Amino acid sequence: MRLLWPALLVLATSCGTAPAAVPLPEVKGAFGARPQVSMPGVRPGRLVRMAVLETGGGRPTAPGDVVLADVEIRRWHDNATRLSTYGTHRPIALVLDGRPLPRAWREAVVGRPAGSRVLLVGPAAQVLAPDLDAAGLPPGEPLVAVIDVLGGYPQDARLVGRPLPTPPPGLTPQAPARTLIGGSGDAVRAGAKVVVQYVAVAWPSRTLADSSYRTGGPAAFTLTPDGVPSGWVEGLRGQRVGGRVAFGAPDAGLLYVVDIVDCVGC
């Protein structure tokens, strides 16, 4: 367990207390684990502030990427959690293709190496990204966000030189998983976060039911029964990054073909 004292970047100014006079929250814990946050017993001021708590060693994110991140958002005044992807096991996806994104989030995630942990403090209007539910919070409500940047990936990330995946002939929802292309990266383990592109088709019609290629690009899931669709834990466990696997979900009547783009925590 670590306590990290960050370098501070002030993103905006306003009348009032100088930034040095307002301490930042204390954040304990390692990247990838749900953070423990302690709030200072003072008013936060009106400034939007960002601090890099930990710099990762992975590829920096770039414009055009889909940035996948775990996020914990808390209210300053009572430290109540308003949103946490650590509990839902579904990291958020931010598409850096020119869509509206608060300046604070751009500073937090653009060019940030995978494996970085970033702290944001400021009003809800700036600390909540567009796809995060404000749940009725006033725009000026002071919030604290801890962001773990899992990585940035091209929207069309796929296995190099391979066509878009389709379920192989003869595959049924009850059939064992098939490795279509063997990967050479880390082996996927239960409980890790997997970054994937996938296609799902209905059985027996084999009509398209879902596809990450049509819904914004790579997605991240925690490989636990409550974090992924039915059949995924059994279908992906033991497969390697860079591989392609096909498997069925009998309960859902679906066939999946999944490209394993990355694995965080394998």
Image (cartoon, rainbow, N blue to C red):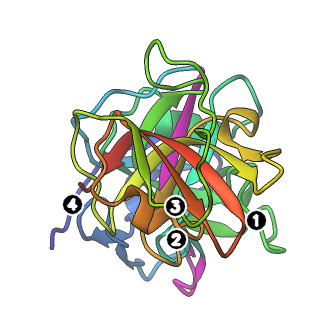
Residue 148, percent from left and from top: 40, 53
Apparent side of residue 98 relative to residue 163 in the rendered image (left or right): right
* Residue labelled with disc 4: 4
Residue 146, percent from left and from top: 45, 61
Which range is magenta? 64-82
Residue appearing at x 75%, y 35% in the figure: 214
| Secondary structure of the residue carrying numbered label 3 | loop
Q: Nearer the viewer, mark 4 or mark 1?
A: 1
Residue appearing at x 74%, y 40% in the figure: 215
- Quadrant assignment, res 179: top left
Q: Quadrant of the N terminus?
A: bottom left
Q: Nearer the viewer, mark 4 or mark 3?
A: 3
Amino acid identity at mark 3: Ala
Q: Is residue 22 visible?
A: no
Disc 4 from disc 1: Cα separation: 28 Å
Mark positioned earlier in the residue sequence (4 or 1): 4
Q: Nearer the viewer, mark 2 or mark 1?
A: 2
Apparent side of residue 260 relative to residue 95 in the rendered image (left or right): left
